[in-house]
Image: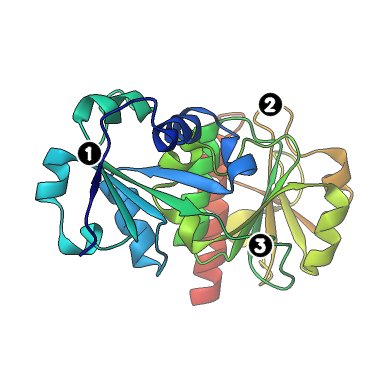
């Protein structure tokens, strides 16, 4: 078992780095590292066969942790609870976290089930869609420029570990999606077949648009099909994360059937 290192100064360079990763939504892009706070995210990382570079525990959490968590990283750091609270972006700080190095240089993978995010702004929506994508067997999520940062702390927390099951590529332009070589499916309130009656292709790429503006013209022009979600209750539209869950589940059900 690795001998833990105790840190007691808030000015320690590692703690400065952790505060930035935990509190700045795009710091991971510069550092190439992401801060995973809490037992659930840490276990989810390990369950997917990944290993962190650093494991950080409060002293009480260290004594309560399983051997798998204690032995996960080559470097283990122990902090007083007050210092962990200074790092955390949560109202109730967790007792542990991992620092994980992000996969480098992933591009668009052609020919696989995909979800495309077109300028979605809400971190909760983005994280929820990632959870649905992983749950329903999609391989990758592609984010166009203007979409909330996929590895920001809020999106990571909302994703609940789904990030580690997906190929994630961000900062794309509409033209980059031409490399997918699968049909793009777009939901519409007034155009296309009803989802429960549609013949859904597989693989495909479901396009989820901006919460207020919907899917942009550049992607609409590339659409291979339009689908409507039946709403007998009479609402004008669904929340984008709810719509994504409905559509992705329909694709999974069609494949299973």
Cα gap from disc 1 to disc 3, whole angstroms: 48 Å
Q: Is residue 175 left or right of residue 105?
A: right
Q: Is residue 122 left or right of residue 224?
A: left
- Residue 240 at x, y = what percent? 58, 38
Which element type, helix, strand or loop, lies under badge 1? loop
Q: Quadrant of residue 14?
A: top left
Residue at point 54%, 29% (across, down): 24
- 216 is higher (above) or lower (below) than 163: above
Residue 9 visible in the current orientation: yes
Q: Nearer the viewer, mark 1 or mark 3?
A: 1
Q: Is residue 20 left or right of residue 201?
A: left
- Residue 235 at x, y = what percent? 56, 29
Name the N-terminal-most of marks 1 and 2: 1
Name the N-terminal-most of marks 1 and 3: 1
Q: Quadrant of residue 209?
A: top right
Residue bearing mark 1: 95
Which is nearer the eye, 223 or 54?
54
Residue at point 40%, 63% (across, down): 51
Residue 88 visible in the current orientation: no
- 173 is higher (above) or lower (below) than 104: above
Name the N-terminal-most of marks 2 and 3: 3
Residue bearing mark 2: 212
- Residue 31 at x, y = what percent? 59, 43
Residue bearing mark 3: 198
Which is nearer the eye, 31 or 235?
31
- Residue 198 at x, y = what percent? 66, 62
Cα gap from disc 1 to disc 2, whole angstroms: 38 Å
């Amino acid at each position: 078992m690795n001998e833990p290192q105790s840190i007691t100064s808030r000015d320690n360079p590692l703690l400065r780095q952790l505060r930035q990763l935990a509190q700045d939504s795009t710091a991971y892009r510069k550092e190439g590292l992401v801060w995973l706070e809490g037992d659930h995210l840490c276990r989810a990382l390990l369950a997917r066969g990944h290993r962190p570079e650093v494991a950080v525990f409060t002293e009480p959490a260290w004594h309560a942790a399983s051997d798998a968590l204690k032995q996960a990283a080559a470097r283990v750091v122990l902090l007083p609870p007050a210092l962990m609270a200074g790092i955390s972006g949560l109202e109730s700080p967790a007792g542990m976290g991992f620092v994980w190095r992000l996969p480098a240089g992933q591009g668009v993978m052609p020919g696989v089930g995909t979800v495309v995010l077109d300028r979605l702004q809400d971190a909760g929506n983005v994280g929820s869609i990632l959870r649905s994508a992983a749950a329903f067997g999609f391989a990758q999520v592609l984010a166009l420029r203007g979409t909330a940062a996929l590895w920001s702390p809020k999106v990571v927390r909302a994703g609940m570990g789904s990030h580690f099951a997906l190929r994630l590529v961000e900062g794309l332009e509409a033209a980059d999606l031409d490399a997918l070589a699968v049909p793009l499916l777009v939901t519409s309130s007034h155009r296309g077949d009803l989802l429960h009656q549609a013949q859904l292709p597989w693989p495909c790429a479901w396009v989820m648009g901006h919460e207020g503006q919907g899917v942009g013209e550049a992607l609409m022009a590339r659409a291979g099909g339009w689908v409507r979600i039946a709403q007998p209750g009479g609402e004008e539209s669904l929340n984008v994360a709810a719509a994504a869950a409905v559509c992705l589940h329909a694709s999974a059900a069609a494949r299973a059937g």
